Amino acid sequence: MRRAMKIILSALIVLGSLFLLQRLLMPKYVDGVIEGAFIAEYYRDVKDHDVIFVGDCEVYENFSPAVLWQEYGINSYIRGSAEQYIWQSYYLLEDTLRYETPKAVVFNIQSLQFSESQREAYNRMTLEGMEWSPVKVKAILASMKPEERFLDYVFPILRYHSRWSELTASDAAYMFKTKPVSFNGYYMRVDVRAAESVPEGKPLADYSFGDNAWKYLDMMVELCEEKGIALILIKAPSLYPYWYPQWEEQVEAYAAEKNLPYINFLDIQEETGIDYTTDTYDGGLHMNLSGAEKLSRYMGRYLLDEAGIPNRSGEAELAGRWEKKLAAYEAEKRAQYEYYGMTEED
């Protein structure tokens, strides 16, 4: 019995040490590249959102749930991540439905251009933050590049065992719980870099979206229909990567065939008020705070008037939660304006 206890104790010490080591070595995404933290943050929020956004940086940098709440009483969350592929968007939606059923899902169609994963780093920034479930397993299997191994997702220490030289104080400070870095999935940037000399798209040999991309869009449509969720397709007003007219034709035809609303924000600059000299922080790829708040005001009006999303500003408990979120949102605004030597009027 004594020998068995020693063996068990030794095994527990080894497993515990490996667990702690894994927690230390895994990227925390609290400094620098913070986008890898967005997916995990969703699980901390109360799950009663009426609108869920899914997609890549063209949603999490271009729309502000804080504005949707503050001006329209719309409770929303962005389940976005860097270069989120359409099969990942689908499984994130399926994952979301394990916790709640929103009234509307807004999907940005930029990722239709990809029919297979491009980089492991982007896979990990989306998949590692998902809570374990059969949905996560399916998402990993759908996303892995040929050189990736499923076991590396189950035991991330196998992937990050050589990350010693990259460790910072944040890796120790946030081993078990990271600080919030988004605002209901929104990534705030207040700095400004005007869009100048935006390159035209290079001619492509084939403008057709791949079968795999279409397959997952069909699956998303079917899932939303099954759950009684309104699916809204959008194209954010990012000037780059270039959005080809041939791609636009395919999306318009698909939306018409499936009777889905489709908003291309590139075509309604006047209605949204987007100014590419003041409303982008990186030359037209993404909106800054000013641009994101303008798009959110347009989207909020659409969601209320066209999608029938309720104004819930009169709900005391929900309003109380948002009061705290808005305080953090405004504090981050002030901190960023001060950092960049700007004022809100700038």
Image (cartoon, rainbow, N blue to C red):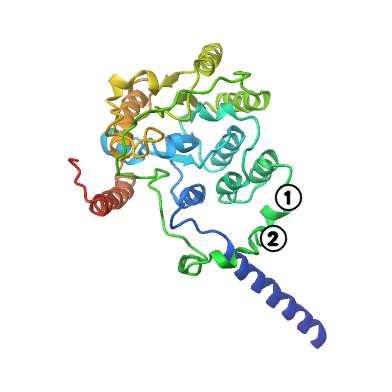
Tag 2's secondary structure?
A: helix
- Could you tell me the amino acid type at mark 1? Arg
Dot 2, crowdedness within 10 Å: few (<14), some or many (≥20)? few
* Structural distance between the alpha carbons of marks 2 and 1: 10 Å
Report the quarter where the C terminus lies.
top left
The residue closer to the viewer here, 79 or 305, is 79
Q: Is residue 287 above or below residue 109?
A: below
Disc 2: which residue: 158
Disc 1: which residue: 149
The residue closer to the viewer here, 139 or 115, is 115
Q: Residue at x 73, y 46 (%)?
A: 147
Residue 338 seen in render: yes
Left-right relation of 30 to 14:
left
Which residue is the extreme one toward the bottom?
2
Q: Is residue 52 above or below residue 215?
A: below
- Could you tell me the amino acid type at mark 2? Leu
Label 1 near label 2: C-beta < 8 Å? yes
Left-right relation of 175 to 275:
right
Q: Is residue 201 above or below residue 10?
A: above
The quadrant holding residue 68 is top left
Whichever of labels 2 and 1 marks the residue nearer the N terminus, that label is 1
The quadrant holding residue 145 is top right
The quadrant holding residue 189 is top left
Residue 312 seen in render: no
Q: Residue at x 48, y 65 (%)?
A: 174
Left-right relation of 261 to 17:
left
Tag 1's secondary structure?
A: loop
Residue 137 locus on image (x, y percent): 68, 45
